[in-house]
């Protein structure tokens, strides 16, 4: 068993991702409970913990990591553990914070003592891995989470440790806010002493603290204000807010990733005498720290991504303390999408009336001159994906979505909205697909099809399905049971990958009137089933039970390798194209990435990339001209098939 | 791994390092993202990807490309055009003359019967450009032994890329 | 191509999924650490809406 020494050594420094640095921070303060639902960019935190618990068996004596069924459950789980006296971490992505906010609003009032609770929110400006963009920093004001914003992996670790200590001392839920950039960037992190966490604690009754009903709700709210003010007072002692000095009369206030872009942009523009205030703690702000910085300036530029958050607070502080300084920010910087060094440099050049460096202007101009010939390459389903095969069947059964609406959801099938399949008419949130379909199906006579994945089904999908059963909503629901939370990196689906829960049983128990289990590797049969379903009124559910293509392929390859290393021979299957009529059925309707269009002896034909094809056989089933052929080598030897779910 | 990255999409990554940092922090490496036009080296495992994020390139950039193309589904479906490798090279020459191409996928299939080693071959290929200073071959070998599966094959791939790279670049 | 020790070296690695772009990036970063480099900072990106 190979050990990852970066999580065992106690001195020196190691190269780590921001997320790994957070894990390291947790191990150095004795955190002992972590519950989360996978979500980019926080999934690696859970994966790292799971890996460490397998490698270092001693850790299991006190450290518990749960893949929770959804973020709201994860938040309450963590509170429960914190209230026995443990230090708990609750990671989630920014949309997950929306889901958990109900529970967190109360946990914040009650406070995590006797333990400590740190929530880690992975934001996603630029929507690099999400289905929306929002500035979730406003939650820190509403629910009163003092919030650290690290800019590099070393700060990820340092702020995590500080957050736990302060959370315990001040009975307040603390937040660490990373973004996709800071969570997934790598840098040096110093390694310090590790601490063992609490294996078991004890819950001590305190009804007014843990039950925020009247009159305790008001008292707890008053206490919360008091705790925040105490923290606001000690902010300067924390040394997380730093001034990089300069004598220019225009200054900059910034935090998180934009700090790095700003510093490099200033250096490029020859503006190294501009003073910069870097905020490590973005809530609460210490009034004196801010006003001391503002008093020396005529103008201050606030550099932050998305909706103005710091800018609003700083304008308020300046006004209340009668500091006369011009504040700009959203006037120049975009309120959408993420930033980069180049973007910040271009905008600062405008503000300071300087020419952006020739290097930047040339780079932008030349790139703009040719960028239109770059073909798109958006993410799509892997070769052998059962979800893509299902979309093929749906397109055939509905004659390219004639009179049909697809109410999509979050998961790999989210990619169905890209061309050429374009199989997704709307996306709201986790299990928003079924929910929207329920409403839609009452107000239109078009065919309504909804999608949901297995992990999403367990997350929040059972609820709308129960409602659909109750109203016998006229919709067709596809549940993609591929047994992995695939989109976020193949985390296990709670209860499915180990087998204690069964989606089929749950559907039957809920009373679904029309239920079929199908295998999309048999597309012709699936197309028939869908056609039958669309002729029936009422609720119909088809469970597509076929393992994620990528995972199934990996398993199959490892089985084959084992057998061959033992000296046995294995049956080899491959598919090849001969006599292609270029009807484009496999490229425009099935759209498998393992198929490419080539010219052989002056004739254009489709060709299967042998190293990308995983041998699912779907193209072989659907070619209308019989141009795809199957060949089997060593037919008498052992056959390694697909893993049965 | 990083979920979305596995879905046949385009991937770009920035790596930056600074051997010795200045005492006055303002001139140091502080952002994980490269500024427009600031790249010293582009290692492209697929040719058209060099153009997709070409905004970080300039006259000081060396380009090391794998010439084996991987068409996206829109290309296969004949709904978009893939510019020829010659056209891609022509556009890159607008930046600098240090454009080097090699069919690493063919090399990998020939020597190792799989395309898993393409990235390591490309690393070996990039080293003779001199744009990865202060790092010796031994350092790469040590890391390969510690972190990768099949270290022997990967070390062979590194040296293969290095040899072939030196032939192309020293010309 | 003589680099000073205080120069910042900037490398872009691009490719399609499954080619090992991220593995290659890690290799370079860890090798830089072995070479005793004082600061390393890298970013991995996989844009959903990239053109």
Image: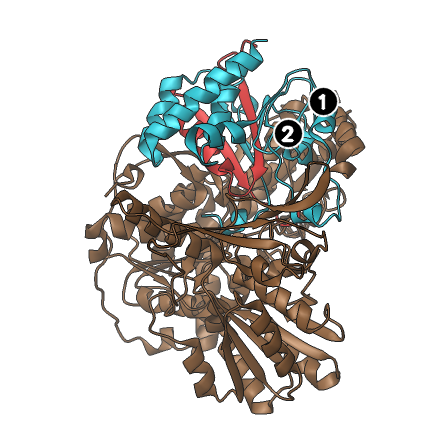
Rendered position, B65 above or below A108: above
* Residue B20 visible at all: no
Q: Could you say which is closer to the camera, residue A604 or residue A306?
A: A604
Q: Mark 2 and mark 1: span between their CA atoms?
A: 10 Å
Q: Which residue is mark 1?
A: A359
Q: Residues within 10 Å of mark 1 (few under 14, many from 20)?
A: some
Chain identifier matching the red colour in the rendered picture: C
Q: Position of residue A72 (x, y in %)?
A: 46, 69
* Residue A498 visible at all: yes
Q: Secondary structure at mark 1?
A: helix
**Quarter holding residue A94:** bottom right
The quarter of the picture where the C terminus of chain A appears is bottom left
Q: How is the image coloured?
A: by chain
Rendered position, A77 above or below A244: below
Horizontal placement of A440 versus A639: left or right?
A: right
The reply to whether callout 2 and callout 1 are in contact (CB within 8 Å) is yes
Q: Chain A in the picture: what colour? A: brown
Q: Position of residue B145 (x, y in %)?
A: 32, 29
Q: Residues within 10 Å of mark 2 (few under 14, many from 20)?
A: many
Horizontal placement of A470 versus A215: left or right?
A: right
Label 2 is found on which chain of the structure?
A: B
Q: Position of residue A617 (x, y in %)?
A: 52, 58
Horizontal placement of A324 versus B143: left or right?
A: right
Q: Could you say which is closer to the camera, residue B7 or residue B80?
A: B80
On the same chain, marks 2 and 1? The answer is no
Q: Secondary structure at mark 2?
A: loop
Q: Could you say which is closer to the camera, residue A455 or residue A96?
A: A455
Q: Which residue is mark 2?
A: B35
Q: Chain B in the picture: what colour? A: cyan
Name the outermost residue toward the front.
A636
The quarter of the picture where the N terminus of chain A appears is top left
Horizontal placement of A44 versus A432: left or right?
A: left
């Amino acid at each position: 068993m190979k050990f990852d020494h970066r999580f065992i050594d106690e001195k020196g420094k190691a190269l780590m991702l921001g997320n790994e640095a957070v894990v390291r921070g947790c191990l150095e303060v004795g955190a002992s409970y972590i519950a989360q639902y996978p979500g980019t960019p926080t999934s690696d935190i859970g994966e790292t913990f799971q890996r460490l618990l397998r490698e270092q068996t001693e850790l299991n004596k006190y450290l518990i990591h749960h893949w929770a069924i959804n973020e709201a459950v994860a938040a309450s789980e963590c509170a429960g553990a914190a209230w026995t006296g443990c230090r708990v971490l609750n990671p989630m992505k920014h949309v997950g914070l929306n889901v958990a906010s109900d529970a967190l609003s109360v946990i914040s009032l009650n406070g995590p003592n006797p333990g400590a609770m740190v929530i880690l929110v992975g934001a996603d400006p630029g929507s690099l891995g999400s289905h929306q963009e929002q500035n979730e920093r406003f939650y820190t004001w509403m629910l009163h989470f003092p919030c650290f914003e690290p800019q590099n992996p070393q700060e990820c670790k340092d702020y995590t440790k500080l957050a736990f200590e302060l959370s315990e001392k001040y009975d307040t839920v603390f937040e660490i806010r990373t973004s996709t950039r800071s969570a997934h960037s790598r840098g040096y992190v110093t390694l310090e002493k590790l601490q063992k966490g609490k294996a078991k604690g004890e819950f001590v009754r305190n009804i007014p603290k843990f039950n925020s009903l009247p009159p305790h709700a008001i008292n707890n709210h008053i206490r919360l204000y008091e705790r925040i003010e105490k923290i606001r007072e000690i902010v300067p002692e924390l040394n997380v807010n730093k001034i990089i000095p300069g004598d220019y009369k225009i200054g900059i206030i910034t935090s998180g990733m934009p700090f790095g872009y700003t510093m490099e942009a200033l250096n490029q523009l020859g503006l190294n005498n501009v003073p910069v205030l870097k905020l490590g703690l973005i809530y609460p702000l210490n009034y004196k720290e801010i006003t001391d910085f503002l008093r020396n300036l005529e103008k201050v530029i606030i550099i932050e991504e998305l909706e103005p958050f710091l800018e609003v607070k700083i304008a308020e502080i300046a006004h209340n303390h009668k500091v006369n300084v011009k504040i700009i920010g959203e006037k120049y910087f975009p309120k959408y999408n993420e930033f980069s060094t180049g973007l910040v440099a271009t905008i600062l050049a405008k503000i300071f009336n300087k020419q952006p460096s020739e290097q930047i202007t040339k780079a932008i101009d030349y790139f703009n001159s040719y960028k239109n010939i770059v073909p798109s390459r958006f993410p799509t389903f892997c070769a052998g994906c059962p979800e893509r095969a299902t979309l093929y069947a749906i397109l055939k059964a509905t004659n390219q979505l004639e009179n049909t609406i697809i109410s999509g959801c979050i998961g790999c099938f989210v990619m169905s909205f890209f061309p050429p399949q374009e199989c997704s008419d709307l996306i709201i949130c986790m299990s928003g697909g079924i929910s929207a379909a329920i409403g839609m199906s009452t107000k239109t006579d078009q065919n309504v099809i909804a999608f949901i994945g297995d992990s999403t089904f367990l997350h929040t999908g059972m609820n709308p399905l129960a409602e659909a059963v109750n109203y016998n909503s006229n919709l067709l629901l596809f549940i993609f049971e591929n047994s992995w939370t695939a989109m976020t990196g193949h985390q296990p689906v709670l209860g499915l990958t180990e087998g204690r829960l069964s989606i089929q049983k749950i559907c039957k128990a809920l009373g679904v009137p029309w239920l079929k289990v199908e295998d999309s590797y048999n597309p012709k049969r699936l197309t028939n089933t869908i056609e039958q379903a669309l002729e029936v009124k009422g609720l119909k559910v088809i469970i597509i039970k076929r393992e994620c293509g990528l995972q199934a392929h990996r398993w199959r390859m490892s089985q084959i390798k084992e057998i061959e290393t033992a000296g046995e021979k294995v049956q080899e299957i491959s598919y090849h194209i001969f006599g292609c009529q270029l009807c484009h059925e496999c490229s425009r309707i099935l759209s498998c990435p393992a198929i490419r269009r080539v010219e052989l002896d002056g004739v254009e034909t489709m060709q299967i990339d042998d190293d990308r094809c995983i041998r699912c056989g779907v193209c072989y089933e659907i070619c209308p001209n019989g141009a795809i052929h199957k060949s089997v080598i060593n037919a008498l030897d052992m056959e390694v098939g697909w893993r049965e779910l | 791994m990083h979920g979305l990255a596995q879905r046949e999409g385009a991937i770009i990554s920035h790596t930056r390092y600074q051997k010795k940092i200045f005492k006055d922090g303002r001139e140091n490496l502080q952002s994980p993202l490269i500024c427009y036009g600031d790249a010293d080296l582009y290692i492209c495992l697929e040719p058209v990807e060099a153009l997709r994020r070409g905004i970080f390139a300039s006259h000081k950039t060396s380009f090391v490309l794998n010439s084996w193309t991987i068409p996206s589904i829109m290309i296969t479906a004949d709904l978009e055009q893939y510019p020829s490798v010659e056209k891609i090279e022509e556009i890159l020459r607008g930046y600098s003359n240090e454009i080097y191409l090699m069919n690493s996928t063919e090399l990998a299939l020939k020597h190792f019967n799989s395309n898993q080693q393409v990235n390591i071959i490309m690393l070996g290929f990039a080293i003779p450009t001199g744009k990865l200073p202060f790092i010796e071959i031994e350092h790469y070998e040590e890391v390969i032994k510690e972190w990768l599966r099949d270290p022997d094959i990967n070390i062979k791939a590194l040296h293969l890329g290095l040899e072939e790279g030196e032939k192309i670049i020293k010309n | 191509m003589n680099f000073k020790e205080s120069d910042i070296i900037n490398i872009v690695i691009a490719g399609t999924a499954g080619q090992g772009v991220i593995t290659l990036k890690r290799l370079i970063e860890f090798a830089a650490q072995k070479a005793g480099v004082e600061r390393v900072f890298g970013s991995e990106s996989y844009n959903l809406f990239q053109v």
